[in-house]
Image (cartoon, helix red, strand yellow):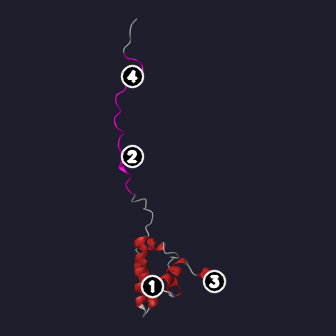
Amino acid sequence: HHDSLMTKIAVWLDSVKPGFGAAYGQVFADMGCDDESDLQYFKQAGKLTAVAGKLAATAGEKFIDKSKIMQAIKAVLAETTLPVSKSNPKPKPTACERPPPPEPESPPPRGGSSRGG
Protein backbone atom coordinates (compact mmCIF):
# COMPACT_ATOMS: atom_id res chain seq x y z
CA HIS A 1 0.00 0.00 0.00
CA HIS A 2 2.45 2.59 -1.22
CA ASP A 3 0.29 5.68 -0.86
CA SER A 4 0.51 5.44 2.94
CA LEU A 5 3.80 7.29 2.42
CA MET A 6 1.82 10.18 0.99
CA THR A 7 0.64 12.35 3.83
CA LYS A 8 -2.59 14.27 3.41
CA ILE A 9 -0.55 17.42 2.89
CA ALA A 10 1.35 15.72 0.05
CA VAL A 11 -1.91 14.72 -1.58
CA TRP A 12 -3.08 18.31 -1.17
CA LEU A 13 0.17 19.60 -2.68
CA ASP A 14 -0.39 17.30 -5.64
CA SER A 15 -3.78 18.91 -6.07
CA VAL A 16 -2.06 22.30 -6.30
CA LYS A 17 0.21 20.94 -9.01
CA PRO A 18 1.05 17.32 -9.83
CA GLY A 19 4.48 16.48 -8.43
CA PHE A 20 4.38 19.04 -5.64
CA GLY A 21 3.49 16.35 -3.10
CA ALA A 22 6.60 14.35 -3.90
CA ALA A 23 8.78 17.45 -4.15
CA TYR A 24 7.59 19.43 -1.14
CA GLY A 25 5.59 17.07 1.07
CA GLN A 26 8.71 16.40 3.12
CA VAL A 27 9.07 20.11 3.91
CA PHE A 28 5.71 20.06 5.64
CA ALA A 29 6.27 16.66 7.21
CA ASP A 30 9.56 17.88 8.72
CA MET A 31 7.67 20.71 10.39
CA GLY A 32 4.99 18.40 11.74
CA CYS A 33 2.36 19.40 9.21
CA ASP A 34 0.72 16.34 7.70
CA ASP A 35 -2.73 17.75 6.95
CA GLU A 36 -3.78 21.04 5.37
CA SER A 37 -5.81 21.82 8.51
CA ASP A 38 -2.47 22.07 10.37
CA LEU A 39 -1.75 25.17 8.31
CA GLN A 40 -4.16 27.09 10.52
CA TYR A 41 -1.99 26.36 13.54
CA PHE A 42 1.13 27.29 11.58
CA LYS A 43 -0.48 30.63 10.80
CA GLN A 44 -1.43 31.21 14.44
CA ALA A 45 2.09 30.30 15.56
CA GLY A 46 3.58 32.60 12.94
CA LYS A 47 5.34 29.66 11.30
CA LEU A 48 4.20 30.31 7.74
CA THR A 49 7.33 32.39 7.11
CA ALA A 50 9.43 29.41 8.17
CA VAL A 51 7.42 27.20 5.81
CA ALA A 52 7.98 29.71 3.00
CA GLY A 53 11.70 29.78 3.74
CA LYS A 54 11.99 26.00 3.66
CA LEU A 55 9.96 25.82 0.47
CA ALA A 56 12.20 28.42 -1.12
CA ALA A 57 15.29 26.47 -0.10
CA THR A 58 13.78 23.25 -1.46
CA ALA A 59 12.49 24.84 -4.65
CA GLY A 60 15.81 26.55 -5.42
CA GLU A 61 15.55 28.00 -8.91
CA LYS A 62 11.90 26.95 -9.12
CA PHE A 63 10.93 29.76 -6.78
CA ILE A 64 7.60 30.03 -8.62
CA ASP A 65 6.71 26.69 -7.03
CA LYS A 66 7.02 28.26 -3.59
CA SER A 67 4.80 31.14 -4.68
CA LYS A 68 2.14 28.75 -5.96
CA ILE A 69 2.19 26.74 -2.74
CA MET A 70 1.99 29.85 -0.56
CA GLN A 71 -0.95 31.06 -2.66
CA ALA A 72 -2.63 27.71 -2.16
CA ILE A 73 -1.97 27.86 1.59
CA LYS A 74 -3.59 31.29 1.76
CA ALA A 75 -6.59 29.93 -0.13
CA VAL A 76 -6.90 27.07 2.38
CA LEU A 77 -6.62 29.46 5.31
CA ALA A 78 -9.29 31.68 3.80
CA GLU A 79 -11.82 28.87 3.67
CA THR A 80 -10.86 26.97 6.83
CA THR A 81 -11.61 28.42 10.22
CA LEU A 82 -10.63 26.83 13.48
CA PRO A 83 -13.03 26.61 16.38
CA VAL A 84 -12.78 29.86 18.31
CA SER A 85 -10.12 29.67 20.99
CA LYS A 86 -11.26 29.92 24.59
CA SER A 87 -9.40 33.19 25.12
CA ASN A 88 -11.66 34.86 22.56
CA PRO A 89 -15.13 33.34 22.85
CA LYS A 90 -17.93 34.61 20.69
CA PRO A 91 -20.32 36.80 22.67
CA LYS A 92 -23.41 34.90 23.62
CA PRO A 93 -26.75 36.24 22.41
CA THR A 94 -27.89 38.82 24.93
CA ALA A 95 -31.34 37.25 25.30
CA CYS A 96 -30.21 34.88 28.05
CA GLU A 97 -28.44 37.65 29.96
CA ARG A 98 -31.45 39.95 30.24
CA PRO A 99 -33.24 39.85 33.58
CA PRO A 100 -36.66 38.22 33.26
CA PRO A 101 -39.50 40.70 32.72
CA PRO A 102 -41.05 41.86 35.98
CA GLU A 103 -43.96 39.64 36.84
CA PRO A 104 -47.31 41.29 37.56
CA GLU A 105 -47.76 41.40 41.29
CA SER A 106 -49.74 38.38 42.26
CA PRO A 107 -52.01 38.46 45.26
CA PRO A 108 -50.58 36.74 48.35
CA PRO A 109 -51.31 32.98 48.40
CA ARG A 110 -53.69 33.23 51.38
CA GLY A 111 -56.56 35.64 51.10
CA GLY A 112 -55.25 38.75 52.82
CA SER A 113 -58.70 40.04 53.70
CA SER A 114 -59.75 37.91 56.65
CA ARG A 115 -63.47 37.97 57.05
CA GLY A 116 -64.51 37.80 60.61
CA GLY A 117 -67.66 35.76 60.96
Q: Amino acid at mark 1?
A: Lys
Which label lies toward us, 4 or 1? 4
Which label lies toward us, 2 or 1? 2
Q: Earlier in the sequence, mark 4 or mark 3?
A: 3
Residue placed under numbered mark 3 in the picture? 2
Q: Amino acid at mark 3?
A: His
Which label lies toward us, 3 or 1? 3
The span shown in magenta is: 90-112
Disc 3 and disc 2: Cα gap in Å? 54 Å
Residue 97's place in the image compared with 19, above or below, is: above
Q: Are marks 3 and 1 in contact (CB under 8 Å)?
A: no
Label for residue 54? Answer: 1
Q: Earlier in the sequence, mark 2 or mark 4?
A: 2
Residue reaching furthest to the right: 1
Disc 4 and disc 1: Cα gap in Å? 78 Å
Label for residue 108? Answer: 4
Q: Is residue 98 shown in magenta?
A: yes
Tell me what residue is drawn at x 39 percent, y 22 percent.
Answer: 108
Query: Callout 3 environment at 10 Å: few (<14), some (14 to 19), or many (20+)?
Result: few
Residue 27 coordinates in the image, percent (x, y): 49, 83
On the picture, is 5 further left or further right than 57? right
Query: Callout 4 environment at 10 Å: few (<14), some (14 to 19), or many (20+)?
Result: few
